[in-house]
Image (cartoon, rainbow, N blue to C red):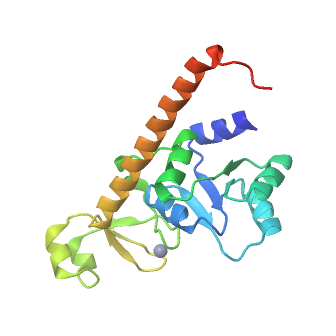
């Protein structure tokens, strides 16, 4: 299962199905171009069935659901962290990337539809004048009509990523230290 999961991630098969607890993470993934399906209406059985039928990687916080997925050969990722940056760090460890150039494939955080770039003229009615003057990159969702731009929330996204990287580095240092120290440790019975 481990190798299948790595293979799927490596092949940039970015199709995911997130459980009802992970709405915030789903929105974050969509911004970076991941096809992240998320529904609060599906129960565990339906989630497993949909993941299997659609070939999506199940991302869940529920240990029991995670185990059931693995038993059915459904690739799954268990999320244990509570904070968004912690969850993002867990996905980075699984080989997911969150780079600025992925915005070329960005999706609507609300409905998961791929966004297309829009000109200032096109979005003039939907964007406050100050933002229209200040920013140059605008996106539109043709499914739900929402308009997006790289405004102040982009700073929040960047700081989330920064915290995620710090968490990963801290953990890597810890595990290196753990390994170095283990041979001299007395066996625990
Ligand atoms: Zn939308």
Q: Nearer the viewer, residue 6 or 23?
A: 23
- Note whether 184 is above or below 137 in the view shown: above
- Note whether 105 is above or below 12 in the view shown: below
Look at 44% across and 36% down and name the residue there. Answer: 169
Q: Can you name the residue that lies furthest to the right here?
A: 71
Q: Nearer the viewer, residue 156 or 12?
A: 156
Direction from residue 164 to residue 137 in the image, left or right = left
Q: Quadrant of residue 61?
A: bottom right
Look at 79% across and 66% down and name the residue there. Answer: 44
Look at 46% across and 54% down and name the residue there. Answer: 85
Direction from residue 8 to residue 73 in the image, left or right = right
The quadrant the C terminus occupies is: top right
How far across and how far down the image is residue 183, in percent? 64, 14
How far across and how far down the image is residue 187, in percent? 74, 20
Q: Is residue 52 visible?
A: no
How far across and how far down the image is residue 111, in percent? 52, 72
Q: Can you name the residue that lies furthest to the bottom here?
A: 125
Query: So how many labels did they put on this image?
Result: 0
- Note whether 96 is above or below 46 in the view shown: above
Q: Nearer the viewer, residue 4 or 40?
A: 40
The quadrant the N terminus occupies is: top right
Q: Is residue 174 visible?
A: yes
How far across and how far down the image is residue 35, in percent? 56, 58
Q: Quadrant of residue 150?
A: bottom left
């Amino acid at each position: 299962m481990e190798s299948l999961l790595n293979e799927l991630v490596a092949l940039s098969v970015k199709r995911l199905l997130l459980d009802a607890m992970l709405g915030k993470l789903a929105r974050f993934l969509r911004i970076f171009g991941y096809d992240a399906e998320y529904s609060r209406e599906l129960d565990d059985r339906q989630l497993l069935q949909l993941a299997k039928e659609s070939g999506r990687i199940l991302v869940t916080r529920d240990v029991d659901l995670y185990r059931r997925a693995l038993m059915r050969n459904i690739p799954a990722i268990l999320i244990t962290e509570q904070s968004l940056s912690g969850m993002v760090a867990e996905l980075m460890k699984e080989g997911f990337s969150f780079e600025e150039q992925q915005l070329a494939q960005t999706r609507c955080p609300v409905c998961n539809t791929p966004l297309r770039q829009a000109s200032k003229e096109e979005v003039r009615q939907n964007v406050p004048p100050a933002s229209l003057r200040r920013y140059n990159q605008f996106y539109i969702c043709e499914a739900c009509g929402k308009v997006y731009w790289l405004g102040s929330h982009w700073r929040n996204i960047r700081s989330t990523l920064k915290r995620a990287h710090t968490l990963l580095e801290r953990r890597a240092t810890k595990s290196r230290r753990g390994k170095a120290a283990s041979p001299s440790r007395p066996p625990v019975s």
